[in-house]
Amino acid sequence: MTQQLTAVVTGASSGIGAATARALAGAGYHVFCAARRAERIEALAAEIGGTAVVTDVTSQQSVEDLAAVVGERLDVLVNNAGGAFGLAPVAQADTDDWRRMYDVNVIGLMQVTRALLPALVASGAGAIVNVGSTAGRIAYEGGAGYTAAKHGTKVVTETLRLELWDQPVRVMEIAPGMVRTEEFSLVRFEGDQARAEAVYEGVAEPLVAEDIADAITWMVTRPAHVNVDSLVIKPRAQAAQHKVYRG
Ligand code: 8X3
């Protein structure tokens, strides 16, 4: 009997993470759904036949507990937990917001990767997908805390690929542009629904979480020698970060 493939998805409680957990389960993986909100991931795990693991990626202890649940072998790690807090210019930047962004988008990703790397190597064909952003490719006004953190995600990915050059682990990054999810902009604007809505105003078809989940599933299901280093993905309406067609 062949062993069922396994995947860990962080930030699995909503948005891209939840959609990716569903998509990978649909592709045959047993998915460990990791996030802080127990109720959400328990419902998701029950729906897809996976395992819910309450995890705070910024906590070293919590990440070690996740690794203990996963065990000795892991095929896929999707480092999706992340987020933006605020849109203040540098001159008015909130230090705590910046710390939180670096903590979750960079340090959290590192901690989870460090803890799960032995299991990924042990699979003989591990795959890591780090969820970056077009914010890790450009700069925009008010975005520096987030763009700096997502540039960090990108560079950590590149560094890890160099360091694992002789190991059986692919290291990939997906960099989505405008994706309309239930929470990304709402979290950024601390629950201000009107500001969150304005981000997508007039855009007939922003990307949705399922578009990114589909791309991630494609990346990890390529043959083990195929490393999709980096995949930038935007809605057709977003020709560039500042050039969005609003019809
Ligand atoms: C989200 C993309 O444009 O809000 O990662 O920075 S953006």
Image: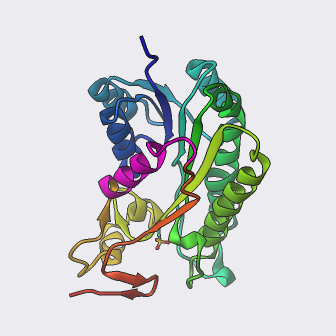
Residue 222: x and y in percent read: 46, 46
244 in relation to 79, above or below = below
Residue found 71% across the figure and 52% down from its top? 161
Residue found 25% across the figure and 78% down from its top? 203
**Where the C terminus falls, by quadrant?**
bottom left
Q: Quadrant of residue 95?
A: bottom right
Magenta residue check for 217? yes
202 in relation to 159, above or below = below
Residue 215 appears in the figure: yes
**Where the N terminus falls, by quadrant?**
top left
Q: Is residue 16 left or right of residue 95?
A: left
91 in relation to 188, above or below = below
Residue 124: x and y in percent read: 63, 29
**View extreme (top): residue:** 1
Magenta residue check for 192? no
- Please give the count of numbered marks on the rendered protein: 0
Residue 240: x and y in percent read: 44, 84
Q: In the image, which residues are magenta? A: 210-225
Residue found 54% across the figure and 53% down from its top? 82
Q: Using the image as rendered, state which of residue 129 and residue 81 is in the foreground.
A: 129
Residue 96 appears in the figure: no
Residue found 59% across the figure and 68% down from its top? 146
131 in relation to 26, above or below = below
Q: Is residue 204 left or right of residue 198?
A: left
Q: Is residue 193 left or right of residue 230?
A: left
Q: Is residue 82 left or right of residue 90?
A: left
Residue 104: x and y in percent read: 62, 51
Q: Using the image as rendered, state which of residue 79 and residue 88 is in the foreground.
A: 79
